[in-house]
Image: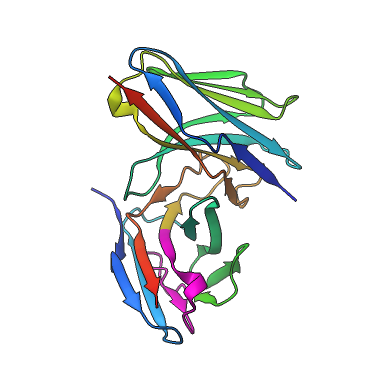
Amino acid sequence: DAEITQSPRHKITETGRQVTLACHQTWNHNNMFWYRQDLGHGLRLIHYSYGVQDTNKGEVSDGYSVSRSNTEDLPLTLESAASSQTSVYFCASSESGTSSYNEQFFGPGTRLTVL
Amino acid sequence: SQKIEQNSEALNIQEGKTATLTCNYTNYSPAYLQWYRQDPGRGPVFLLLIRENEKEKRKERLKVTFDTTLKQSLFHITASQPADSATYLCALRGYSSASKIIFGSGTRLSIRP
C-alpha cells in the first residue's frame, strides 16, 4: 500500500545545530508540503513543492529550507535550530491537477525539541 | 489576511447525540472546503470535501454544509460514538489546483458514553 513516512519520529537537538527531517511518500504525488503544528495555531505551512526541482515558501519559512531532487522525498532542514522551532512537524502529499480533490495525505509527524 | 476560526474550546457530547462543529472564515473565497480528523499523536486524515456550489454533502454519519454567504461550514456527526472523539480540522482551498490549503486550528470533540 502507498504511504507517507517521516523520520525520525522524535528528535531532541541543541540550539544552533542543523537538523534535517525526512519525508518519503510512495503515492507518486507531485505535491508535497511541510507543516508545523503548535497549540493554538493549528497547521502552518512551512514550505511546499509542486514537483521535482520546485520549492516554494509558506507562511512560516524563516529558518527552514527544503529541496526536491526526486518525486518521493522532500527533506526539511533547520539551518540553525532555535527553541522557537520546537514543534510537531507534519509532511503531506497530494495529487496535482484540477480534477482531483487535492486531499492531503499526512505522515505520522516528527516531534522536535530544541534545547 | 485570510483567517479560519473553529471552536477553540472542546466540545463534549453525550453518545448517540449529534455533534455539530463550526468553521468560519474571513477574507477568502474558497472553491473547496475540506474536513480532516486528527487523533492524538497522528497526522490528520481526510474525511470530506464540499465545493462552493454545493450546499450539503453526506458520508455515512457525517454531514457537511457550506454557506458562502455566511462564510461558514458546519460539520455534523449523527449518532455519535466514543470512537468519534478526536480533533476535527477544517481547511480551505482556492480554485487553482496550485492553491495552498489553509487549515483551521481544530476543535477537539469528546463523546462520553
- Return the residue found at the far left: A1
Locate residue A97 relative to residue B24 in the image: left or right. left
Which quarter shows the C terminus of chain A? bottom left
Q: Is residue B96 magenta?
A: no
Q: Does A84 lie within the magenta span?
A: yes
Q: Is residue A22 visible?
A: yes
Could you say which quadrant of the image residue B12 lies in?
A: top left
Magenta highlight range: A68-90
Q: Residue at x 46, y 80 (%)?
A: A81
Q: Is residue B19 left or right of residue B70?
A: left
Residue B81 horizontal/vertical position (percent): 31, 20
Say above or below: A89 vs B25.
Answer: below
Residue extending furthest bottom? A16
Q: Position of residue A17 (x, y in %)?
A: 41, 86
Q: How many marks?
A: 0
Residue B103 relative to residue A18: left or right: right
| Rendered position, B34 above or below A57 | above
Where A18 falls versus A52 (above or below)?
Answer: below
Give percent across and percent down for residue A24.
33, 64
Residue positioned 57% across, 48% down in the render: B101
Residue at image location 62% in from the left, 24% down from the top: B66
